[in-house]
Structure formats: structure tokens, C-alpha cells
Image (tube, coloured by chain):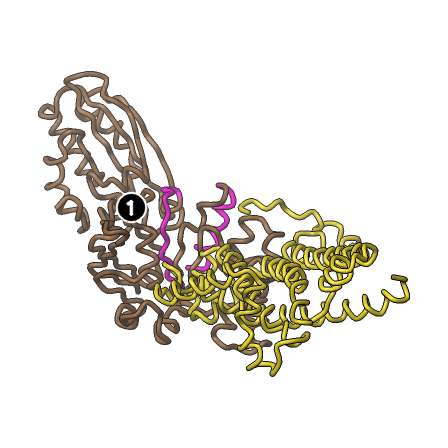
């Protein structure tokens, strides 16, 4: 639905060049919620602004719903008619809502329809319908300053949907909101994604956002996509920074001559008593350093960091047992050893940063 | 001078002032608003970024503003004659007044429009709006309270300028204060004129402030009719705004 190839953005100011995007290849499938996560300055904002050409990329292409937007942009600074029409089919919500304080809630939602040249009656019908969809039907005549942050963002979302977009871009939509409101807004985005088949590309610096609603995610660092894939793929990838961040387990080895192993359970394996089987079969004492159970992208996932006595070489057999159970196993300090074996079972994953 | 002598003079002066200031304000707004908006749009990083146009307009505005009004009036004499066919009288005064006020108002407009959050501009662009849409739907409506304050300031400044318009025989309150009060030592006349001016200016400032404030506070409770609050007591407790 959204594809970028070799997207590069270089800002020039007073002779200095800052590369915000450095050859970003992104592929967002139709109907999914795709999260791009990264710290501030990683280039997330530039990326999402390049997708609807609010920022003109220095190089590379952006294709949304089969339309090559970069080709529509032309040479000049101003957006031509074709690009503006394409933009009207891409909804966008913002961190600071960007509602016009001089207009009522309803008039704010009508604004994109005014730009599309819809008649007055059609505009108000559509606006009220959308406000109903986001649960703010009773606030149509209020002004934005009378609303709470979460309500403002709902208006922002209603406004973004006014042009019946297939794609919704969310620029840190929940970053200015408290945790509870964040959850309700994310739920709304999730519902819209399911009900309307809306493809959502969101950027965020909050891992929780990715955990709650994303089907796929990408990690951005220094203008590059370091990791990307569906959340399942990421969790199944040894050494994935995103998976570790999505699902952190901590705990230090209690001494030398110990092997620390991270075990990730998902799907069927999560229900098996694997650790006690391991202990009984090989007659070893296992200590649990840390463990967590959580729902990621709607699925139960568990992660555990365990410690086996003895060095890695002595534990090759028990670790092999764990792998046979269909678990994903990472041995601390032996990633190089673990990765090739897992490569067969783990789905293909893009890891550009490693290359 | 007795009151019966002063009264017709004052009355005529009031009308002259209102006439001159009214027309020149209108022209200043019509001319200064686009100029001010253009200054913002053509600036670096603006929607119509154009350094040459920006510098040229900026310089013209600066030069016009640095000229003392009385010099401007004399300098513009031939232009005034070309427009109005005369260089004396109220109509002749409107030309330099308007031309003096255009750059003044333009600078105020520039400041007001620059205050508009760029995020709003971006939002309208993301909806597919063009530059004209941005100006019409965002820049002007969102800066309207400041623009009204700017217009108020312009009117007050124009009333001050109009005192000098007396030198081209345009009359007006300021002119009476100078001619009767200062030059003929009619102290009473002078103080009455000053008093009238003070009242007029206060009234204009008050009206302008009121209009600007009621627009700026749109939806912040104060302008909501009390009746509605009485009828629906529950939602009257407006949630505190978090982000703004």
C-alpha cells in the first residue's frame, strides 16, 4: 500500500548538510498497522512527511496505493494539483492535533471536505457521521479549546477520515496524551483499521504503541531502518533489538561458568511445561533470572531468561532440547553460534543494520 | 471663544477626522493585509519562498515607514493630485494617510500571521489544500484577533497622523487643536479638542479590544450564553484543556 525505495532526505542550511533519511526502503501492506519506532532525531518525522510529500525527498520514490507521488511532485516547491488530489486521499493525524481554534469541531472536520469542494449539506452529513464514529457526536458545536487532549485527537482522526482515505498517517498521535487516553486512541485506530480496512502507518517513540496495535514494525536509527518485519517475525528473530525492546527481560548471570539463555515462547509452545521437562530429563538445576508474559499484537508471548550451570559447551544438549520443543532460544554471548541454526526455522527478516 | 462658536467647528472637525481616518483605514487594510501576508509567504521557509520579492517588499515597507508623515505628505503631492485632482482638502489628505498606513499595517499583519502555528498550515497541506486555501482557511481566520488589534492600532496612529493633515487644509480634530488652540492661544479650544480626541481614541481602542478578545476566546466559556448552561448543567463542567 505504501512503498518507499531508497528514500533520502538531506537538509541543507548555511552550507551544512544533515541527512535525515538515508535510503529508507519501507513496505506497508494493505490493511495493516505499521509502526516505525525510533528516538527523536532518528528521522521518523521526516519519513512520515515524505510519504505525503509534505517534505520533498532528496532522492528515492514514494508510492501510495499504486500512485508514484514523487513523480507527481514536479520540480517546484509548490504542490501541483495532482499531488494535492493524491494527498486528499491520505489522512494524517498529528501529535499536537493541529485543529483550527477559530472553527467548531464540526467545521474542523468539514475543512477537508471544503477543500474537496463538497456541498454544504454533504459536508455536514459526513462530518456528523464521522464525529459519531469517533464518539464525539455531542461535541459538534464545541470549539477545540473546550475539549480534552484525547477528544481533540478524536476530532483530528475524524478530520483525517473525511476524504475517505485508504491510508492514515499518524505522526506521534498519542505522544501528547496520558497513558489512559493513549490506550483509548490506539483502540480507536485499531477499530478503524479493522472496520474500514484502513492501512495505518504510524511513527512513535513509545514501544507500548507498537506492542498494542502494530502488525508490523520497523526500528529507525540515524535515518536508516535497522530492523523491520511483522511483530511475529521480529519476536522470532534472535538478537532482534526490537523484539528485546518490545519484550524486555533482564537478569545477570550469577557467576562464571554459567550459561544464560533467553527463551521466547509463542504459539503452542507457550502452553508446554518445558522448563520442568528440561530439568527432569537432564537432571540440571535451572534458575530463572527474569521472565515476562504479555500480549503482543493480540497474541500471548512469553519470554524467560534462565541460567544453566556450566559453560555453554556443557549445555549444548539441553539447549538443543529446548530448540526441539519449538522454542526460540538465544544464548548470551553465543549469538553467532545460535543464529545459523535458527535461520532455517525463523522467517526471513530484513536486518540492514547488521549487513 | 464661546461654546456656540466652538461647537460647529468641533462638529465639522469630528466628521472630517472620521471621514479621513475611515477611508484611509479601509485602504490601509485592503492594501496592507495582502502585503503582510505576502511578506510571510515569501520569507525563507514560507509557502511561496522568494527572497527577491521578500527583500524588495521589505525594503519598500521600511523606507515608507521611516519617512516622517509630514514629509511623506509633501513628497506625495503630485501623486495625490493625479489621484484626487487636488492637493488640498480632506480627499487630498486621505491619499498620504492611506499610503503612510499601508506599510505600518503590513508589518503588523506580518507579525500576526507569523504567529499562526505552522502545524495548522501543514495540516491543511496534508488535506490537499493549496497556498490560497492555507491563506483563506488558516492564516487569516486564525490570526483574526491579532489582525483586529492591529487594525485598531492603525486607526489610532492614523488619527495622530491626521492632525498633520491640517497643513494641507484637510481639517479634523488635530488641526483645530493646532490652529485654534496653539496658534491663536485659544487654550479652551485646545483642551476641548484634546478631550474629544481622548474620548474617540479610548472608544476605538475599547471596541477593538473587545472584538479581538471575544474572537480569541471563542469557545472558552465566557461567550457561551448563560441560558444554555442552565438548561444542561452536566456538560457545563468543561474538561480542562491539557495540551494548550
Residue A82: image quadrant is: bottom left
User: For the point 81% across and 66% down, which residue is it?
Assistant: B10
User: For the point 56% across and 69% down, which residue is it?
Assistant: B74
Q: Position of residue A286 (x, y in %)?
A: 24, 22
Q: Position of residue A113 (x, y in %)?
A: 51, 72
User: For the point 38% across and 71% down, which residue is it?
Assistant: A84
Residue B183: image quadrant is: bottom right
Instruction: Report the label total.
Output: 1
Q: Chain in brown?
A: A
The quadrant of the picture occupied by the N terminus of chain B is bottom right
Visible in this render: residue A145? yes
Examine the residues drawn in magenta and state their main secondary structure: helix
Depicted A1 relative to depicted A331: above or below: below
Q: Chain in yellow?
A: B
Left or right for B124, reference B142:
left
Seen from the viewer's position, the closer of residues A343 and A46 is: A46
Residue A290 part of the magenta segment: no
Q: Position of residue A337 (x, y in %)?
A: 10, 35
Mark 1 sits on what residue? Answer: A42
Seen from the viewer's position, the closer of residues B57 and A192 is: B57
Depicted A87 relative to depicted B199: above or below: below
Seen from the viewer's position, the closer of residues A212 and B36 is: B36
User: For the point 17% across and 38% down, which residue is it?
Assistant: A324
Give, as a single range, the part of the protein colored magenta. Answer: A179-208
Seen from the viewer's position, the closer of residues B68 and A263 is: B68
Left or right for A243, reference A312:
right
The single residue placed furthest to the front in the displayed view is B184
Left or right for A30, reference B177:
left
Q: Position of residue A315 (x, y in %)?
A: 13, 26
Residue A136: image quadrant is: bottom right
Amino acid at each position: 500500500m505504501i512503498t518507499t525505495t531508497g528514500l533520502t532526505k538531506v537538509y541543507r542550511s548555511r552550507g551544512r548538510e544533515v541527512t535525515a533519511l538515508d535510503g529508507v526502503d519501507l513496505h506497508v501492506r494493505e490493511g495493516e498497522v505499521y509502526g516505525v519506532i525510533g528516538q527523536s532525531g532518528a528521522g521518523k518525522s521526516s519519513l512520515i512527511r515524505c510519504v505525503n510529500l509534505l517534505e520533498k525527498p532528496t532522492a528515492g520514490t514514494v508510492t501510495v496505493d499504486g500512485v508514484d507521488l514523487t513523480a507527481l511532485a514536479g520540480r517546484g516547491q509548490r504542490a501541483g494539483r495532482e499531488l494535492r488530489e493524491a494527498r486528499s486521499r491520505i489522512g494524517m493525524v498529528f501529535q499536537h492535533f493541529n485543529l483550527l481554534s477559530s472553527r467548531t469541531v464540526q467545521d474542523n472536520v468539514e475543512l477537508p471536505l471544503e477543500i474537496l469542494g463538497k456541498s454544504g449539506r454533504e459536508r455536514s452529513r459526513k462530518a456528523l457521521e464521522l464525529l459519531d464514529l469517533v464518539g464525539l457526536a455531542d461535541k459538534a458545536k464545541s470549539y477545540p479549546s473546550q475539549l480534552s487532549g484525547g477528544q481533540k485527537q478524536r476530532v483530528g482522526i475524524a478530520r483525517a477520515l473525511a476524504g475517505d482515505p485508504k491510508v492514515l498517517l499518524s505522526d506521534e498521535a498519542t505522544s501528547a496524551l496520558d497513558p489512559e487516553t493513549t490506550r483509548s486512541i490506539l483502540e480507536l485506530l485499531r477499530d478503524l483499521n479493522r472496520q474500514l480496512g484502513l492501512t495505518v502507518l504510524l511513527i512513535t517513540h513509545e514501544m507500548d504503541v507498537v506492542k498494542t496495535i502494530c502488525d508490523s514494525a520497523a526500528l529507525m536509527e540515524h535515518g536508516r531502518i535497522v530492523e523491520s518485519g511483522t511483530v511475529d517475525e521480529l519476536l522470532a528473530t534472535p538478537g532482534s533489538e526490537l523484539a528485546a525492546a518490545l519484550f524486555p527481560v533482564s537478569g545477570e548471570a550469577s557467576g562464571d561458568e554459567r550459561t544464560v539463555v533467553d527463551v521466547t515462547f509463542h504459539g503452542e509452545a507457550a502452553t508446554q511445561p518445558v522448563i520442568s521437562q528440561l530439568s527432569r530429563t537432564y537432571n540440571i538445576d535451572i534458575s530463572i533470572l527474569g521472565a515476562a508474559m504479555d500480549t503482543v499484537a493480540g497474541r500471548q508471548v512469553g519470554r524467560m531468561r534462565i541460567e544453566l550451570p556450566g559453560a555453554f559447551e556443557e549445555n549444548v544438549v539441553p539447549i538443543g532440547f529446548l530448540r526441539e520443543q519449538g522454542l526460540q532460544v538465544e544464548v548470551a554471548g553465543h549469538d553467532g553460534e545460535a543464529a545459523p541454526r535458527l535461520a532455517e526455522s525463523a522467517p526471513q527478516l530484513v536486518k540492514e543494520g547488521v549487513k | 471663544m464661546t461654546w456656540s462658536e466652538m461647537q460647529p467647528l468641533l462638529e465639522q472637525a469630528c466628521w472630517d477626522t472620521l471621514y479621513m481616518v475611515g477611508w484611509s483605514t479601509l485602504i490601509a487594510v485592503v492594501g496592507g493585509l495582502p502585503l503582510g501576508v505576502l511578506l510571510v509567504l515569501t520569507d525563507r521557509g514560507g509557502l511561496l519562498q522568494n527572497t527577491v520579492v521578500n527583500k524588495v517588499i521589505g525594503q519598500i515597507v521600511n523606507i515608507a515607514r521611516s519617512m516622517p508623515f509630514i514629509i511623506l505628505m509633501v513628497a506625495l503631492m503630485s501623486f495625490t493630485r493625479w489621484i484626487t485632482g487636488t492637493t488640498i482638502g480632506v480627499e487630498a489628505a486621505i491619499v498620504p494617510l492611506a499610503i503612510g498606513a499601508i506599510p505600518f499595517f503590513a508589518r503588523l499583519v506580518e507579525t500576526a500571521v507569523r504567529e499562526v502555528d505552522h502545524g495548522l498550515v501543514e495540516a491543511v497541506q496534508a488535506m490537499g489544500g493549496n497556498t490560497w486555501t492555507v491563506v483563506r482557511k488558516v492564516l487569516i481566520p486564525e490570526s483574526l484577533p491579532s489582525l483586529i488589534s492591529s487594525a485598531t492600532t492603525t486607526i489610532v496612529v492614523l488619527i495622530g497622523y491626521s492632525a498633520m493633515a491640517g497643513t494641507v487644509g484637510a481639517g479634523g480634530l488635530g488641526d483645530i487643536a493646532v490652529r485654534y488652540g496653539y496658534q491663536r492661544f485659544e487654550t479652551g479650544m485646545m483642551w476641548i479638542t484634546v478631550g474629544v480626541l481622548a474620548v474617540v481614541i479610548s472608544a476605538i481602542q475599547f471596541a477593538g479590544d473587545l472584538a479581538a478578545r471575544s474572537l480569541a476566546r471563542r469557545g472558552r466559556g465566557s461567550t457561551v450564553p448563560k441560558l444554555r448552561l442552565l438548561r444542561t448543567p452536566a456538560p457545563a463542567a468543561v474538561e480542562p484543556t491539557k495540551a494548550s
